[in-house]
């Protein structure tokens, strides 16, 4: 793992059973029952089962899953709007589950804000006072909270609308006020439960851009619930997929598209155009079919190595570590006219080049260093994610 990925939230074996006494349900789950069986046998709703994961500083961590899979329960456990039935949650190493209500309020007031799907704006207050509402609840004085609310409205492009009432604002603007309310606290963690789900597709895409822009300005730790695969793919650094209260997979969008854990996960992302989401670096391989050769004055030893390895092409690295070209075993020379792809190039823009290249397309980073080769097989396998359908 890279050094910059400091863990902010550590979740271990988290459970939520909606029952006064969770023990019978926990025992059944432990014995291998699923949520449906617990409901059938005990008439008890299972919210979250044995969830363990880390959320890193500055990342957008998206939780996905079908309706009823436990997403809202999970996010509400994170700030203890719901009390867990088991397991624990650490924030910056501090065990939240062990804190008293008073201590908890202190921690959460400082660090976390929540944004909901329904904007929850107060109709008789203007945008400024709505944006200031969270701070008002937290007991911040009037001048200070209005200043913070105005700054937050400015961040979401609504400073000119501070004195408008919710009924005078469009749905998208109302959700911006909701976002401003969360931002006004200047939280380091934002919990967003389907925050954009009620918006029209175009406005929704705007809000996603807005969130990504805010994130570039100041990276907060964001837990974002969505049931929309496109949205998740667009904004997530990592995605956790939930099914029946359990987390069935956690990974980057590319990892999940490339290797979905099961048919449920695969079905979720089936409609997504992976060629626009994935980058060359996501599929570039350095496996044993990709032979790396060091630059030499005489190509003979390199050609011998290709023959020994039984491959038609070798990828040549110069003395300075930069990629030089592809050596063809057949012609004994470099393949001409073969521009390497950049790691950040989207697959969509590379389809033609991969299809027409005589060998897997070399991929290099910004410094011209070889990252791997992109083969037609890898591309097809990833883009053709058909297969048997669910149900
Ligand atoms: N307060 C509650 N009491 C009983 N069951 C609940 C309660 N809240 C949620 N549930 C149940 O927990 C499960 C997960 O719900 P939820 O977290 O809202 O799912 P999602 O947000 O993924 O749609 C569902 O089966 C739901 O019926
Ligand atoms: Mg929900």
Image (cartoon, helix red, strand yellow):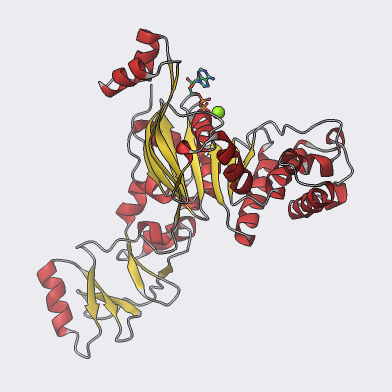
Q: Quadrant of residue 106?
A: top right
Q: Of residues 222 and 352, which is closer to you in this image?
A: 222
Residue 256 falls left or right of residue 159 = left
Task: Pinpoint residue 253: horizontal percent, then vertical percent.
Answer: 44, 48
Q: Residue furthest right?
A: 163
Q: Is residue 324 above or below residue 193?
A: below
Task: Pinpoint residue 14: horizontal percent, then vertical percent.
Answer: 40, 33
Question: Residue drawn 74% across and 54% down?
Answer: 155
Q: Residue furthest left?
A: 308
Q: Is residue 76 above or below residue 325?
A: above
Q: How many marks?
A: 0
Question: Residue drawn 38% across and 59% down?
Answer: 355
Q: Is residue 259 visible?
A: yes
Task: Pinpoint residue 145: horizontal percent, then vertical percent.
Answer: 79, 48
User: Quarter of the image containing the N terminus?
Assistant: bottom left
Question: Residue drawn 16% across and 78% down?
Answer: 303
Q: Quadrant of residue 95?
A: top left
Residue 181 falls left or right of residue 343 = right
Q: Quadrant of residue 193?
A: top right
Q: Is residue 384 visible?
A: no
Image quarter where ligand 2 lies: top right
Residue 313 falls left or right of residue 100 = left
Task: Pinpoint residue 222: horizontal percent, then vertical percent.
Answer: 55, 47
Q: Of residues 220 and 214, which is closer to you in this image?
A: 220
User: Quarter of the image containing the C terminus?
Assistant: top left
Question: Residue drawn 42% across and 33% down?
Answer: 242
Q: Is residue 228 above or below residue 284?
A: above
């Amino acid at each position: 793992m890279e050094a910059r990925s400091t863990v902010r939230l550590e979740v271990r074996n988290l459970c939520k059973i909606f029952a006064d006494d969770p023990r019978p349900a926990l025992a059944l789950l432990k014995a291998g029952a699923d949520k449906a069986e617990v409901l059938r046998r005990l008439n008890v709703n299972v919210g979250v089962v044995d969830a363990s994961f880390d959320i890193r500083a500055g990342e957008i961590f998206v939780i996905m899953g079908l309706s009823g899979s436990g997403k809202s329960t999970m996010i509400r456990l994170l700030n203890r709007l719901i009390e867990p039935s088991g397991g624990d949650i650490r924030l910056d190493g501090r065990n939240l589950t062990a804190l008293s209500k008073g201590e908890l309020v202190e921690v959460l007031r400082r660090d976390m804000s929540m944004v909901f799907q329904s904007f929850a704006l107060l109709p008789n207050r203007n945008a400024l006072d709505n944006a200031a509402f969270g701070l008002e609840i937290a007991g911040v004085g009037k001048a200070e909270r209005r200043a913070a609310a105005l700054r937050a409205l400015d961040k979401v492009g609504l400073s000119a609308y501070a004195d408008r009432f919710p009924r005078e604002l469009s749905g998208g603007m109302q959700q911006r006020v909701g976002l401003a309310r969360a931002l006004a606290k200047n939280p380091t963690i934002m919990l967003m439960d389907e925050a954009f789900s009620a918006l029209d597709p175009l406005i929704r895409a705007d809000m996603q851009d807005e969130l990504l822009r805010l994130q570039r300005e100041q990276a907060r730790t964001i837990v974002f619930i969505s049931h929309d695969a496109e949205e998740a793919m667009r904004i997530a650094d990592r995605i956790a997929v939930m099914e029946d209260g359990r987390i069935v997979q956690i990974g980057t969008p590319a990892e999940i598209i490339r290797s979905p854990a099961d048919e449920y996960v695969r079905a979720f992302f089936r409609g997504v155009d992976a060629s626009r989401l994935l980058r060359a670096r996501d599929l570039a391989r350095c496996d044993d079919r990709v032979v790396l050769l060091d630059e030499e004055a005489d190509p003979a030893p390199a050609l011998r190595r290709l023959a020994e390895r039984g491959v038609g092409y070798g990828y040549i690295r110069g003395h300075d570590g930069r990629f030089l070209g592809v050596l063809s075993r057949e012609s004994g020379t470099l393949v001409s006219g073969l521009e390497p792809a950049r790691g950040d190039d989207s697959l969509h823009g590379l389809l033609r080049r991969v299809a027409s290249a005589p060998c897997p397309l070399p991929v290099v980073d910004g410094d011209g260093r070889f990252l791997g080769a992109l083969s037609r097989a890898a591309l097809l396998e990833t883009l053709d994610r058909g297969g048997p359908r669910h149900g």
